[in-house]
Image: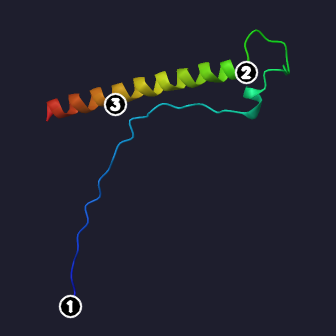
Amino acid sequence: MTELTEFMDIYMVDPHRTFGGLIFESDFNTEYRGRTEKQSPAAKRIVAARRFDNQCRQNADARDRRLVMKEAVL
């Protein structure tokens, strides 16, 4: 007997949509400073990751607006 079974995949969207950035072991070493800078390398990476997140959010918002406009035209 041949039986056809259909499966429905449930797609769950992960609500975490931000880039956490890269974490290095040296970020936890507070005793060593490789270079004398005003900002720590870890802080620079955090700021860069936040800028990346903001750019991604702007791109997603623009994409959503385009989809809404496209649906309104149809």
Task: Report the Cα–Cα distance between label 3 and label 1.
Answer: 49 Å
Q: Position of residue 46 (x, y in %)?
A: 61, 22
Q: Say whether disc 1 or disc 2 marks the residue closer to the N-terminus.
A: 1
Q: Residue at x 43, y 34 (%)?
A: 16
**Residue 26, quarter of the rendered image:** top right
Q: Residues within 10 Å of mark 3 (few under 14, many from 20)?
A: few
> As shown in the figure, which amino acid type bears the numbered disc 3?
Arg
Circle 1 packing at 10 Å, graded few (<14), some (14-19), many (20+), is: few
Of badges 3 and 1, the one in the foreground is 1
Instruction: Report which residue position mark 1 lands on.
Output: 1
Labelled pair 3, 1 in contact (Cβ < 8 Å): no
Q: Distance from label 2 to label 3 (Cα)? A: 33 Å
Classify 16 as above or below 46: below
Numbered badge on residue 41: 2
The amino acid beneath tag 2 is Pro
Specify which label sits upstream in the sequence, 2 or 3.
2
Residue where numbered disc 3 is placed: 63
